[in-house]
Image: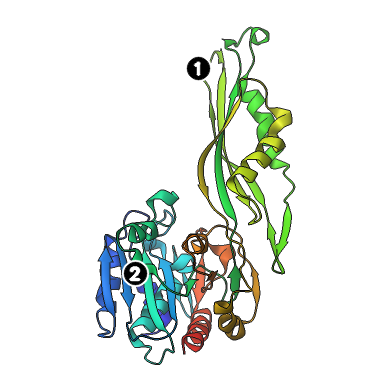
Amino acid sequence: MSRLAETAELVAINSVSGMESELATLVAGRLALNPALEITRIGDNVVARTTFGKQRRVIVAGHLDTVPGNPSDALLEGNTLTGLGAVDMKGSIAVMLHLATTHQSSSHDLTWVFYAREEIARDQSGLLEIHRERPDLLQGDIAILGEPTDGDLEAGCQGTLRLEVEITGQRAHTARPFTGVNAIHRLGRVIDAVAGFVPRHVTLDGVDFVEQMQVVFASGGVANNVVPDRATCTINYRVAPDRTLADAEEAIRTFLGSVLSQGDSVRTLDWAPSCPPDLSQPALADLRRVVGTVRAKVGWTDVATFREWGLPAINFGVGDPLLAHRSDEFVTAEQLDDYEAKLRAYLS
């Protein structure tokens, strides 16, 4: 079966975050075809390891879940597969599964990690679940994340900070709004400020990270005839790797300072740390020689998680990352074959 057909089989299985059980069962069953693999299943996470005693252990990891959508909308037409998760990241998962069950000549010991719940809050991550229960399964010398990179290398990742901004006002009758203060109108100034955010550029190890900021939720209102005294919005701030959580929180409070007043508040909801490129790490040198092109990762990935555990890590996967989370995401047979050839060459 071709990698494109194998990807189509995976795309057809609904694995929206929290619903990965069926796909995890398929993955475990496929991995069991290789007697050289030691297989461990923890919840809906599957880890398969070789234990040949090689000098270096390479971890190749990918998440099984997708963002919400309808897998039945998938379309396989010629050499192109369009459908939920084709790019993020079932194309990479299909190649990983194929190599895990067929590749016989690696110069490294290999750990294949297929984990759940990457697309939702970080504290629910299947990768963290594995680490809590069996941290020994995630020991190695380098980690490769199969996040979509169009077959190139994407180094490091941005941090992602989610904050809630609460704006206060004064209730009044809508017939007499001058006796109150409309919190939704004041919230509009916050939204306008974020809409005018000028991205900050940071260059590390020769690759350029560009910060981004977006309002992703907004709410407020009491009744049709009441001037609202409270309104909130949630801001997602994508942070360059040179900033810690404290740095990022201070930066956003400074940025919003001119549109906030006494009684307003900014509260951190969620933080996933950034990861610097680490391109000077010797463990990445062979992979760079095989793949060539390196750029910064736009977005957050679990390279940051592996780095917290002391492993150099990099993003390397199939599919155009600009298509991730879109309704028309697609991969081609050529992209899958190119990724397989590069990953096989590195592992050999």
**Left or right of residue 51: residue 199:** right
Residue tagged 1: 223
Q: Amino acid at mark 1?
A: Ala
User: Marks 1 and 2: in contact by CB < 8 Å?
Assistant: no
Instruction: Say whether residue 12 is visible.
Output: no
How are the residues colored?
rainbow
Instruction: Say whether residue 10 is visible.
Output: yes
Instruction: Decide which of 282, 224 is in the foreground and name it.
Output: 282
Tell which circle, 2 or 1, labels the residue nearer the N-terminal end.
2
Q: Where does the N terminus fall, quadrant-wise?
A: bottom left
Question: x, y (%) of residue 51?
Answer: 32, 82
Residue 111 image-quadrant placement:
bottom left
At mark 2, the secondary structure is: helix
At mark 1, the secondary structure is: loop
Question: Gap between marks 2 and 1, in whole Å?
Answer: 55 Å
Q: Residue at x 68, y 9 (%)?
A: 178
Instruction: Decide which of 71, 239 is in the foreground and name it.
Output: 239
Q: Residue at x 49, y 65 (%)?
A: 310
Question: x, y (%) of residue 293?
Answer: 65, 78
Q: Residue at x 71, y 38 (%)?
A: 255
The circle drawn on residue 139 is none
Is residue 235 placed above or below 150 in the rendered structure? above
**Left or right of residue 124: residue 316:** right
Could you classify mark 2 by the number of other residues whose Cα lies within 10 Å: few (under 14), some (14-19), or many (20 or more)?
Answer: some
Q: Amino acid at mark 2?
A: Leu
Residue tagged 2: 137
